[in-house]
Image (spheres, rainbow, N blue to C red):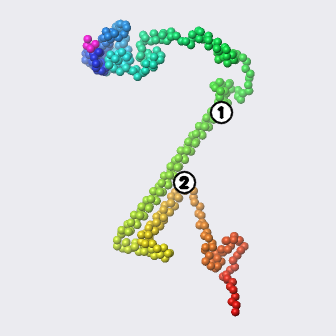
């Protein structure tokens, strides 16, 4: 009575099974011997038979077989007994394989996610493997599949297909093939190897070698190209990082120069007097060259010159490093292009010293007479 009330109660399956396992632990040692396990299964079977589960009566031998199968599936020695947790795990797995038992025990069906179509088209062997059907039902499912009517195997349908095939003549796919019994003409071969028949592109060892060599060559080519691509990417990343470092160095130099000039402007005493003197000296030089700048303009010009000098120094140093690392080519020392020779002529004497005319006309044989050049003048008429 207690077992029946436990099964039909509204509690969860885990609570029901835990109560049943603890109920049949007669000696309270938290282990279920084979006799205690048999009593629990026998009581549950009686309750299931009372509620109409099953169409046959389960005898003692089958209950004993279920007990042995439980110990074997859990990997436990039946003489030592099974723990309550192991017994509860076996019972839960057994209940979850049956849709009726899951409804009765308020558990989740193991195959509830499968659709009805999936369960219907599944083979009987697979259904037995996953636990959808039992061993006694397996033979009936297999017999039903063998006895099921197949329209394609109907004698009338087979005769109709055969008649249609014969009407195709030489294109009949069902005609007998006697070509293997006919003598074949020997053909010239590139080797004495027995021809292989593994497809249209592979007929002998020569073709196999050619195909293998081609695959190997493509593989080597892909590996080499991949290596070159990775190397180029690495070199490009190093080059970008190198030039980024150069830009960072130039920006740092500019900030340093600006901070230095600001510091000089904020100095006092003798240092301030020296700084003002250097600014006035530069201002006087600019005015002598015809350029009038106020104090702020002179300071800005000095700052630009300092920044330009520092930037040229940084770029020169980074250029040396770039040449060493292969990022740039070494610049050839290009002489400054000669300025316009005519603009350098201030007098005929200077033209004589610099041999301007020979350079202009490109005539090596043309020479300028030594001494001062005397410009002919008109004679004074009296």
354 and 175: which one is in front? 175
Quadrant of residue 253 within the rendered picture: bottom left
Residue 26, compared with residue 321, is above or below; it is: above
Q: 10 Å neighbourhood of mark 1: few (<14), some, or many (≥20)?
A: few
Q: Which residues are magenta?
A: 1-5
In reply to whether residue 152 is colored magenta, the answer given is no
Q: Relative to 348, is 118 on the left or the right?
A: left
The local secondary structure at tag 2 comes to loop
| Residue identifier under label 1 | 210
Q: Earlier in the sequence, mark 1 or mark 2?
A: 1
Residue 55 horizontal/vertical position (percent): 37, 8
Note whether residue 87 is visible. no
379 and 132: which one is in front? 379
Q: Relative to 48, is 169 on the left or the right?
A: right
238 and 295: which one is in front? 295
Residue 280, compared with residue 94, is above or below; it is: below
| Residue identifier under label 2 | 327
Residue 192 horizontal/vertical position (percent): 70, 26
The local secondary structure at tag 1 comes to helix
Quarter occupied by the C terminus: bottom right
Residue at 69% from the left image edge and 89% from the top image edge: 380
Residue 26 horizontal/vertical position (percent): 26, 14
214 and 134: which one is in front? 134
Residue at 46% from the left image edge and 11% from the top image edge: 141
Q: Relative to 203, is 323 on the left or the right?
A: left
Residue at 30% from the left image edge and 13% from the top image edge: 40
């Amino acid at each position: 009575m207690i077992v029946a009330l436990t099964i039909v109660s509204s509690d969860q399956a885990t609570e029901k099974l835990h109560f049943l396992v603890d109920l049949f632990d007669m000696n309270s040692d938290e282990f279920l011997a084979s006799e205690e396990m048999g009593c629990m299964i026998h009581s549950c079977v009686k309750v299931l038979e009372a509620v109409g589960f099953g169409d046959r009566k389960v005898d003692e031998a089958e209950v004993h077989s279920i007990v042995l199968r439980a110990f074997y599936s859990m990997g436990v020695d039946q003489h030592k007994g099974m723990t309550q947790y192991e017994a509860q795990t076996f019972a839960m797995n057994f209940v979850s394989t049956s849709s009726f038992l899951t409804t009765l025990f308020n558990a989740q069906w193991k195959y509830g996610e499968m659709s009805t179509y999936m369960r219907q088209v599944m083979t009987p062997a697979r259904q037995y493997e996953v636990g959808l059907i039992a061993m006694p039902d397996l033979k009936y499912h297999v017999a039903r599949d063998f006895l099921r009517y197949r329209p394609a195997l109907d004698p009338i349908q087979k005769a109709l297909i055969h008649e249609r095939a014969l009407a195709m003549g030489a294109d009949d796919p069902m005609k007998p093939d006697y070509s293997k019994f006919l003598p074949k003409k020997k053909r010239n071969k590139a080797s004495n190897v027995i021809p292989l028949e593994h497809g249209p592109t592979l007929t002998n060892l020569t073709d196999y070698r050619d195909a293998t060599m081609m695959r190997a060559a493509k593989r080597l080519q892909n590996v080499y190209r991949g290596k070159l691509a990775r190397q180029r990417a690495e070199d490009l990343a190093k080059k970008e990082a190198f030039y980024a470092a150069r830009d960072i160095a130039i920006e740092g130099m500019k900030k340093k120069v600006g901070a230095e000039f600001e510091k000089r402007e904020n100095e006092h005493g003798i240092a301030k007097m020296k700084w003002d003197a250097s600014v006035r000296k530069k201002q006087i030089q600019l005015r002598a060259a015809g350029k009038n700048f106020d104090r702020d303009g002179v300071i800005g010009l000095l700052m630009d010159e300092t920044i330009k000098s520092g930037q040229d120094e940084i770029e020169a140093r980074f250029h040396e490093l770039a040449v060493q690392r292969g990022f740039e080519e070494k610049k050839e020392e290009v002489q400054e292009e000669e300025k316009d020779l005519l603009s350098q002529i201030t007098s005929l004497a200077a033209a004589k010293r610099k041999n301007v005319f020979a350079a202009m006309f490109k005539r090596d044989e043309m020479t300028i007479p030594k001494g001062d050049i005397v410009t002919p003048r008109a004679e004074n008429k009296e």
